[in-house]
Amino acid sequence: MSILPIVTYNDEVLRKKAAPITENSDNLQKLIDDMFETMYNGSGVGLAAPQIGKSLQLFVTDADPMTEDDDDEPKYGKLVFINPKIIESGDEKATYDEGCLSIPGIRESVTRPNEIKVSYLDRELKEQTATYSGWMSRVFQHELDHLKGVLFIDYLGSFKKRLLKTRLNSVVTGEIEAGYPVKPKN
Ligand code: NI
């Protein structure tokens, strides 16, 4: 397994619509393993393929570090989502701080539906459905956005965005130390 460099927020691959995956392969399985290693190395709870420069509908998650102190939150461990979709969103909304391995050093609160029903293919390309709420729902929605070319900072108001501009520039110039391998786009 290898740790892959993570692209930063201004890389155009993060703005593309990712392509669906149509067949399994040794390369796909290796990519999934490398993505888990890359995610854990960055202390992330989710990582989408565009973040390592591959415009594919694939993300991996392990939201357990977010919920380890909360016995009420279910523990899912490592999950792989291929060609994922939200089938249904609940009316109730929740607001929490989010970060992103492609935008190191920045955390801002984002409002999203609390409960979602989803469909996806697992790493054996078997069809699955699930219902998530709380942290797992949030991580899923954040990562699914990556496959559509959307970043969490897109949800911020224009005033907040203006305040963040200098810090976002420091991500690109490398002034903000990510603590894991990144591939800044200059
Ligand atoms: Ni992200």
Image (cartoon, rainbow, N blue to C red):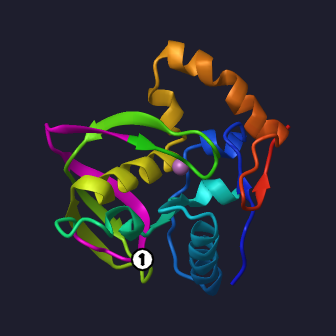
Q: Which residue is mark 1?
A: 78
Q: Amino acid at mark 1?
A: Lys
Most prominent secondary structure in the magenta stretch?
Answer: strand
Q: In the current view of this chain or complex, which residue is farthest to the front?
A: 69
Q: In the current view of this chain or complex, which residue is farthest to the left?
A: 91
Q: Residue 71: image x %, image y %?
A: 20, 70
Q: Quadrant of residue 62?
A: bottom left
Q: Residue 65: image x %, image y %?
A: 41, 67
Q: Is residue 83 above or below residue 107?
A: below
Compare residues 99 and 60 and report the one nearer the observer.
99
Q: Residue 102: image x %, image y %?
A: 64, 48
Q: Secondary structure at mark 1?
A: loop
Which quadrant does the N terminus fall into?
Answer: bottom right
Report the side of 69 relative to 43 (left or right): left
Q: Quadrant of residue 121?
A: bottom left
Report the side of 72 relative to 100 (left or right): left
Q: From where the camera sits, is residue 55 visible?
A: no
Compare residues 36 and 17 and report the one nearer the observer.
36
Report the side of 106 relative to 68 (left or right): right
Q: Residue 100: image x %, image y %?
A: 55, 48
Magenta-colored stretch includes residue 25: no
> Magenta residues?
74-96
Magenta-colored stretch includes residue 84: yes
| Residue appearing at x 28%, y 73% in the figure | 75
| Residue appearing at x 40%, y 34% in the figure | 109
Q: From where the camera sits, is residue 119 visible?
A: yes
